[in-house]
Image (spheres, helix red, strand yellow):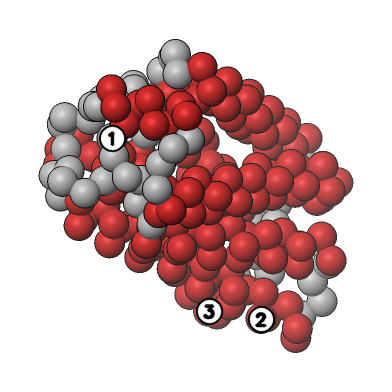
């Protein structure tokens, strides 16, 4: 792997680090339940160390976007397949939405307020949360698409059967988690926070072990 790719890879992992501060949120905000609260509730005004999580989300998404955009620019001077170019464009779209997402937090914490919970269920929240919701859908939808597309259009034919099975299992688990998450969000009953955190964790593990895997060569040269 040449120095330029190593730099891009380091930038992406740095972004992933900052975007993953929710993992240690129990240290800074032990009031929010890991089981019932959205990760985005850490950014709600009035929550402890809200500035830390907002800065982490902005830095994380910005560094990830920068890494994917730099890699996309390199495709102009490299013989990279159209499939990989599409993946990079979707990753740029998803991380770009995440940057916007960091500027528009949720209005309130539904896991701590019955009134807020009812607003969530009736979709009567303010403009900021609508932007937050739309950008979250773009971000998660883009990442799930990248998992699906790369598994069946690149990894299946270019990697070992073991890595294909690992990537396929990861995609199927991610799809299942998000289907259940959608159902729970509509009904309001279930461990929505746990489901979302498991989904994020699966994305991050896929990112670490699949995206820049030298054997798979999904986004490496």
Q: Position of residue 144 (x, y in %)?
A: 65, 42
Left-right relation of 34 to 96: left
Indicate the secondary structure of the residue bearing disc 3: helix
Q: Residue furthest bottom?
A: 77
**Residue 119 in which image quadrant:** top left
Residue that mark 2 sits on: 73
Q: Classify 41 as above or below 2.
A: above
Q: Residue at x 64, y 45 (%)?
A: 141
First in sequence, mark 3 or 2: give its number. 3
Left-right relation of 157 to 129: right
First in sequence, mark 3 or 1: give its number. 3
In this orientation, does residue 64 appear? Answer: yes
Indicate the secondary structure of the residue bearing disc 1: loop
Q: As rendered, which of 49 and 208 lies closer to the eye?
A: 49
Q: CA distance from mark 3 to mark 1?
A: 44 Å
Q: Position of residue 47 (x, y in %)?
A: 17, 43
Residue that mark 1 sits on: 109
Q: Residue at x 43, y 68 (%)?
A: 63
Circle 2 Cα neighbour tier, 10 Å, few/some/many (<14 / 14–19 / ≥20): few
Q: Look at the image and tell me in which quarter the C terminus lies.
A: bottom right
Q: CA distance from mark 3 to mark 2?
A: 16 Å
Circle 3 Cα neighbour tier, 10 Å, few/some/many (<14 / 14–19 / ≥20): few
Q: Which mark is residue 25?
A: none
Q: Residue furthest top?
A: 189
Circle 1 Cα neighbour tier, 10 Å, few/some/many (<14 / 14–19 / ≥20): many
Q: Which mark is residue 3?
A: 3
């Amino acid at each position: 792997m040449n120095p330029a790719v190593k730099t891009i890879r380091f930038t992406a992992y740095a972004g992933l680090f900052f975007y993953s501060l929710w993992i240690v949120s129990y240290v800074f905000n032990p009031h929010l339940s890991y089981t019932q609260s959205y990760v985005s509730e850490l950014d709600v005004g009035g929550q402890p160390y809200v500035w830390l999580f907002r800065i982490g989300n902005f830095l994380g998404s910005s560094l990830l976007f920068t890494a994917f955009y730099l890699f996309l620019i390199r495709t102009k001077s490299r013989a990279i397949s159209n499939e990989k170019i599409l993946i990079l464009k979707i990753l740029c779209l998803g991380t770009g939405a995440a940057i916007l997402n960091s500027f528009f937090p949720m209005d309130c914490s539904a896991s701590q307020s019955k009134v807020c919970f009812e607003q969530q269920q009736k979709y009567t929240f303010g403009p900021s949360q609508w932007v937050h919701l739309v950008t979250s859908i773009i971000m998660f939808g883009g990442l799930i698409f990248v998992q699906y597309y790369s598994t069946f259009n690149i990894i299946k034919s270019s990697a070992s059967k073991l890595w294909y099975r690992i990537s396929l299992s990861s995609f199927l688990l991610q799809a299942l988690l998000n289907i259940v998450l959608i159902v729970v969000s509509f009904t309001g009953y279930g461990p929505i926070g746990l489901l979302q955190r498991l989904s994020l964790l699966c994305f991050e593990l896929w990112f670490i072990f699949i995206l820049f895997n030298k054997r798979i060569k999904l986004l490496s040269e």
